[in-house]
Amino acid sequence: MLLEIDDLALRYEAGPLVVEGLSLRLEAGEIGCLLGPSGCGKTSVLRAIAGFESPCAGEIRLGGECVAAAQRHVPPERRGVRVVFQDFALFPHLTVLENVAFGLRQLARGARHAAALEMLAVVRLPDLADRYPHELSGGQQQRVALARALVTRPRLILLDEPFSSLDTELREELAVEVRDILRSQGATALFVTHDQHESFALADRIGVMHSGHMVQWDTAYNLYHRPVSRFVADFVGQGVFINGRMAADGRVQTALGTPRSRAEHVLPPGTEVDVLLRPDDVVHDDGASMKAVVVKKVFRGATILYTLRLPDGTEILSLVPSHHDHPLGEAIGVRLDAEHVVVFPR
């Protein structure tokens, strides 16, 4: 295990705890993500791993070595960790090549430049070695910052909101590029974001944080389909809660049918529950007996996200291929296409 954090607690000076009881594990070669709203403590965790903050409780281990605890602090330069900052922190007076080579000062000049050129080829910027940071696009600056971190072959790379300064379309595209670069180098990385699309595109494991706590450390699939709390269910993906009542054999009665519950512990029959429905759980089917009225629609190119009202007034979401283009007020057939649904006691 490359990174292990156990019961981490952080506070600034004599203030309240900003992180409490946080634990996670990251294997060598994995890409992890801390995902959550602003102020949830995710950047504080990153700073503690890097060595910029000290925990008041708990422990951080890198490669089995304790690097941070209440009574222990290994300096940042001895942790084998590199940070890619939100603003990239490139040196404006140095060329791209000199920026990448900056962390290799222990090598001879020729070896430094050779290693930097090799890493620039990895991030697909070998022709920009003599440019200065102000001559690059935001995406190019991001890749230079990543190359500078990778060239020293660190044990762990930390990325703090790495795409926040880029436009939305470029973010996902660059997230995929960065993932491929990290994979090609066998690098282990942990990054921070408030954007779930970035985390889904980049990470093997994602930790959803809320008010200084790790709510769920899991795969993207499990966060979406098996959230452990209402907060995770609301924060990750789109969805709505509809009324339900537990029936026998773990099924739940809803206005759309009686799917099985995915509750970890089967709730007694008759228990009132809130049922999480994702837009892809509700299928448009002209032959379905259940009809729902279109009350809102958002065109997304290949798909349309419909808000539909059931006969009992319940509103649900449905993601439908865009050639099924229905006007507001039209009643269309819908059915539930989910073998299991997530439920929470009401």
Image: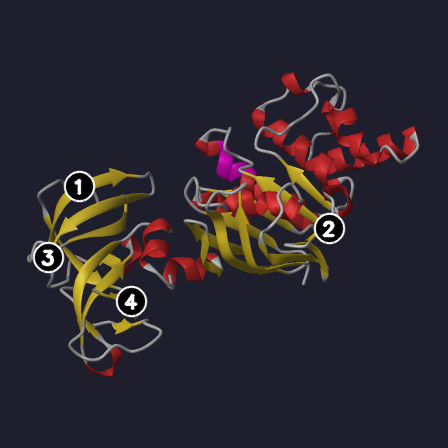
**Image location of residue 331, percent across then percent down:** 9, 50
Q: Quadrant of the N terminus?
A: bottom right
Q: Which amino acid is tagged 4?
A: Val
Of the two numbered discs 4 and 2 on the same chain, state the one appearing first in sequence.
2
- Mark 3 → mark 2, Cα distance in angstroms: 56 Å
Q: Quadrant of residue 305?
A: top left
Closer to the camera in the image, 324 or 17: 17
Q: Which residue is mark 3?
A: 291
Residue 99 is drawn in which quadrant?
Answer: top right
The amino acid beneath tag 2 is Arg
Q: Is residue 107 left or right of residue 314?
A: right
Q: Is residue 137 magenta?
A: no
Magenta part of the chain: 170-174
Which residue is label 4 attached to?
A: 341
Q: How is the image coloured?
A: secondary structure
**In this rendering, does residue 177 appear at all?**
no
Disc 2 on helix, strand or loop? loop
> Real-space Cα distance between discs 1 and 3?
15 Å
User: Residue 266 at x, y = what percent?
Assistant: 29, 78
What residue does disc 2 label?
155
Structural distance between the alpha carbons of marks 2 and 1: 49 Å
Q: Of callouts 4 and 3, which one flags the residue occurring earlier in the amino acid sequence?
A: 3
**Residue at 37% from the left image edge and 55% from the top image edge:** 232
